[in-house]
């Protein structure tokens, strides 16, 4: 039985499907819900390297906070109470770290199948890394 569910929410179509799946599981198991929006470290490319860009950080943080607030609003409209926060860093590390901190029983993420080998090659596959680093079960809500 899942008592604490962590949803990594990005507002995308797959994120919205994950949110719906999360609601179903929470209703069935009477779970606590936690949402996080993972913001990458804001950087700017200069020549061959990157540098931290503090001016982008404020704008990006506001965008990610809006995404998180939208997810929390959708849950509240469905009668679910949840807490949430924006975290900054590499997604797999931030998701697994936060899941450990709240002692989550389940991590829920969305994933969109990409068409063609080139699209999969360019984007990479963060899913397996999350599964390998998670201390608990992982549900991947898939869209096509």
Image: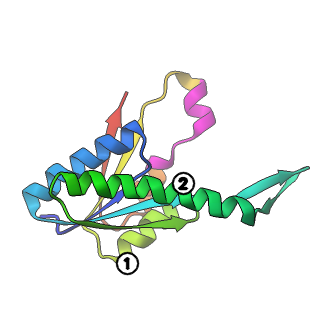
x and y percentages locating residue 139 in the rendered image: 29, 50
Q: Give the prevailing secondary structure in the magenta stretch.
A: helix
Q: In which quarter of the image is the C terminus?
A: top left
Identify the residue at horizontal 58%, vertical 64% (top origin): 89
Q: Name the residue under label 2.
A: 63
Residues packed near mark 1 inside 10 Å, few (<14), some (14 to 19) or many (20 plus): few
Sequence-wise, the earlier of marks 1 and 2 is: 2
- Of residues 41 and 69, the one nearer the viewer is 69
Identify the residue at horizontal 36%, vertical 50% (top origin): 109
x and y percentages locating residue 64 in the rendered image: 51, 56
- Of residues 84 and 17, the one nearer the viewer is 84
- Looking at the image, residue 99 sits to the left or right of residue 49; the answer is left
Q: Mark 1 points at which residue?
A: 101
Considering every residue shown, the one lying at the far top of the view is 116
Q: Which of marks 1 and 2 is in front?
A: 2
Identify the residue at horizontal 74%, vertical 58% (top origin): 43
Instruction: Residue 62: give its label.
Output: none
Is residue 37 visible to the viewer in this orientation of the structure?
Answer: yes
x and y percentages locating residue 17 in the rendered image: 30, 40
Is residue 91 visible to the viewer in this orientation of the structure?
Answer: no
Identify the residue at horizontal 56%, vertical 24% (top origin): 117
Q: What stretch is highlighted in magenta?
A: 118-127
Q: Where 123 sits versus 43, above or below? A: above
Q: What is the C-alpha distance between the residues marked 1 and 2?
A: 25 Å
Q: Is mark 2 on a helix, strand or loop?
A: helix
The quarter of the displayed image where residue 142 is located: top left
The number of numbered badges drawn on the structure is: 2
């Amino acid at each position: 039985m899942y008592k604490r569910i962590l949803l990594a929410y990005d507002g995308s179509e797959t994120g919205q499907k994950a949110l719906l799946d999360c609601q179903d599981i929470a209703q069935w198991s009477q779970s606590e819900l936690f949402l996080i929006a993972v913001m990458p470290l804001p950087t700017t490319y200069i020549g061959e390297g990157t540098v931290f860009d503090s001016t982008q950080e404020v704008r990006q943080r506001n965008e990610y906070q809006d995404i998180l607030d939208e997810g929390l609003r959708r849950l509240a409209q469905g009668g679910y109470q949840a807490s949430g926060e924006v975290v900054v860093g590499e997604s797999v590390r931030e998701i697994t770290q936060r899941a450990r901190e709240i002692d989550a029983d389940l991590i829920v993420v969305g994933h969109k199948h990409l068409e063609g080998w080139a699209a999969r090659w360019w984007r990479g596959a963060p899913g397996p890394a999350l599964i390998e680093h998670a201390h608990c079960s992982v549900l991947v809500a898939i869209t096509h």
